[in-house]
Structure formats: C-alpha cells, structure tokens
Image (spheres, grey):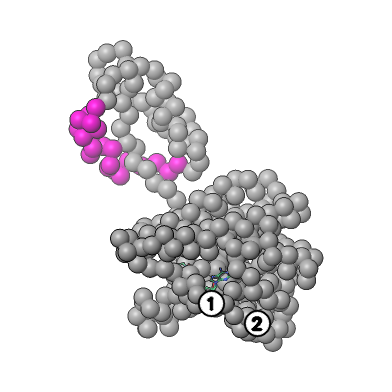
Amino acid sequence: MANELRFDGKVVIITGAGNGLGRSHALLFGSRGAKVVVNDLGGGHTGEGKSSAAADKVVEEIKALGGEAVANYDSVEDGAKIVQTALDHFKRVDIVVNNAGILRDVSFPKMTQDDWDLIYRVHVLGAFRVTHAAWPYLRDQGYGRVIMTASAAGIYGNFGQANYSMAKLGVAGFASTLAIEGKKKNVNVNTIAPIAGSRMTETILPPELIASLKPEYVTPLVAWLCHENCEETGGLFEVGGGFFGKLRWERTKGQTFRMGRAITPETVKSSWGKITSFEETEHPANVMQSMAPILANVQAGPSLGGNEFVDVDLALGS
Ligand code: NAI
C-alpha cells in the first residue's frame, strides 16, 4: 500500500506483549518494519508465576511474518533491563507502549495492602521505570512516542477495582505531565483506555462479546499515535470494538463568591444547583485555564458590601 504508515528503522518496546493487546500491538509494529522488544513476564493474570513462553511465542510469530523481534522476560518493575534489551539488540529506542497489566479485583473491605501494592507496582511503578529509562534516549534524539494504557475503570470507577482504578487513572495523570515535558523535544505521550477480549476480561465479559472485541480493533490507534507524522500529545482515548473517541475534562461554569465576606456551608448549599449544573460548561485544558476563575476572583478583590454572590467574568484564558 503506497500510503501505508510504516515504522522502518524504529525500535519499539511493548510491555506485556505475550498476550492480548500487547501481542496485537507487537504483531502490527513488527509487520510494518519496526524492530520489536517483546516484553512479557509470562505469569498469570493476577500476577503469579513467570515464564518465557509467552514472549518467545510472539517473537516467533513476528519472525514468521518477516519481522524483527527480541524477547525480554523481566518484570516492568525492572524497566531499565527492558530498555537495555532494546539498546543491546537494536542500539536505540523510539517508542514505548506501556501495556503490561494484571488484576486483583476484590471489594474494598476485603482488599489487602498486597492487592493494592501489587497493582500499583505493575501498572504505575512499572510504567514509570520503563519510561524513565527510555526517556533520555527519546528526548536526546528529538523523537519519541509513549503510550500509557489506562482503563474505563480508572476514569469512571468500577465495583471491586479500587486498586486498579487508582493505578489506571494514575498512569493517565502521569502521561499528562510527560506530554508537557516532552513536547519541545517531539516526545509525544498519549493514553488509551481500551476494551478488548483477552484472558484479563474473559472472566468478566460474556463469551460472545469476548469473541468480537478483538485486540486488533485497538492496535490501529496505538500505531497512529506512535507514528512520526502524528502530532497528538496529552490525549486520552477510549477505544475498542471499532469505536475510537477522545475524552476531555468538562467543568460547570460554577458559582464564584466574592471574597471578603463569610462563605458558609449554607452559602454553598444555597448555590448547589449552580455549582453542579452542566447547562453552562467550560473545558479547561491546562492548569492556567483551570485556575482562570479563581485568579479572576482574586483580581476582582474583596466585596465592598452589597451583593454576596457577584458573578466574575470567568471566560477561559481571560
Ligand atoms: P492480558 O492478560 O492478555 O495481557 C497482559 C500481559 O501483561 C500478560 O501477557 C502478562 O504476562 C503481562 N504482564 C503482567 N504483569 C507483568 C509484568 N510485571 N511485567 C511484564 N509483563 C507483565 O491482558 P490485556 O487485556 O491484553 O491487557 C493489556 C493492558 O490493557 C493491561 O494494562 C490492562 O490493564 C489494560 N486494559 C485492558 C482492557 C481489556 O478490555 N482487555 C480494558 C482496560 C485496560
């Protein structure tokens, strides 16, 4: 295909690439010219055990398609070793897809600190360790792409997933700041919240849905976000089953109370409708826009008496 988006000469690290989504990403990158580090610890979906079989199998699949790949069996908690595998075998690193993941689902009262810590270590600390080790190479070469894998459970919450929700929204926040820090050096960082049939979801979703929600429906977004022609950064996308959409924050226009007068719980109660109404909304896209109404109110100064509820011009960026 003449206009095929290719990754010739690029080295991509995909964590947890022995199964599910990671395997699908690895096969696509491998089939389009990238050299792939197929990382997988090879344990069970709740984090027990380890094996080289999962990563080895995907490496063989990529090679069978005519691609180049090398296996790495370290946990993402040892992220520097995974990056070292890329440097040892392919002499560079261009793209990091943080995908490895496990579940420890249990309702909150029954959740142990081990359940909490393990999920944090694999999803958040793992993404930190791999990305932190790769970052200087991406920055210094003036090109890099990083993907974080979040989840609807992190964005919206989901019963029995307090630990997983913490970790998944954690990596999205992590990506927001990396996107700001990487922008000048052409290191773009985006987050996906996928849905796909995999061993992770097979105990939760009905079999018909598992069969149709193929990981291959998620991977094209990852590939586009990682391509050198894609300028998107700091984005959060929901993707799966043929659907692709972008999320942003929305905030009510809210209610501003002039300072210098007592603001009591009763004042808040009396304005609750306005504080929570989404009839008029704003979409702050950075910390400055988030603070705009606060700064406008500070600039307006204390109320000189009279009306307690004075509207201040809250236009974003004003
Ligand atoms: P999967 O269980 O099929 O694949 C995850 C892979 O990560 C496994 O091969 C596993 O061995 C590997 N892994 C686990 N811990 C590791 C560690 N410490 N170091 C290296 N590798 C490790 O799961 P799936 O569904 O493909 O999930 C991939 C990512 O997508 C995960 O981060 C998951 O949380 C996320 N996700 C998946 C959804 C879905 O619908 N399948 C929904 C939302 C998020």
* Residue appearing at x 63%, y 63% in the figure: 78
User: 3 or 292, which is in the foreground?
Assistant: 292
* Residue appearing at x 40%, y 19% in the figure: 300
Magenta highlight on residue 121: no
* Residue appearing at x 59%, y 56% in the figure: 128
Q: Where residue 292 appears, x then y in whole percent? A: 45, 32
Q: Secondary structure at mark 2?
A: helix
Start and end of the magenta stretch? 264-284
Alpha carbon distance from label 2 to label 1: 16 Å
| Amino acid bearing label 2 | Asp
| Amino acid bearing label 1 | Gly
Q: Where residue 10 appears, x then y in whole percent? A: 73, 66
The image quadrant where one finds the N terminus is bottom right
- What is the number of callouts on the image? 2
Using residue 309 as the reference point, say whether residue 192 is left or right of it.
Answer: right
Q: Quadrant of residue 315?
A: top left
Q: Circle 1 sits on which residue? A: 49
Magenta highlight on residue 278: yes
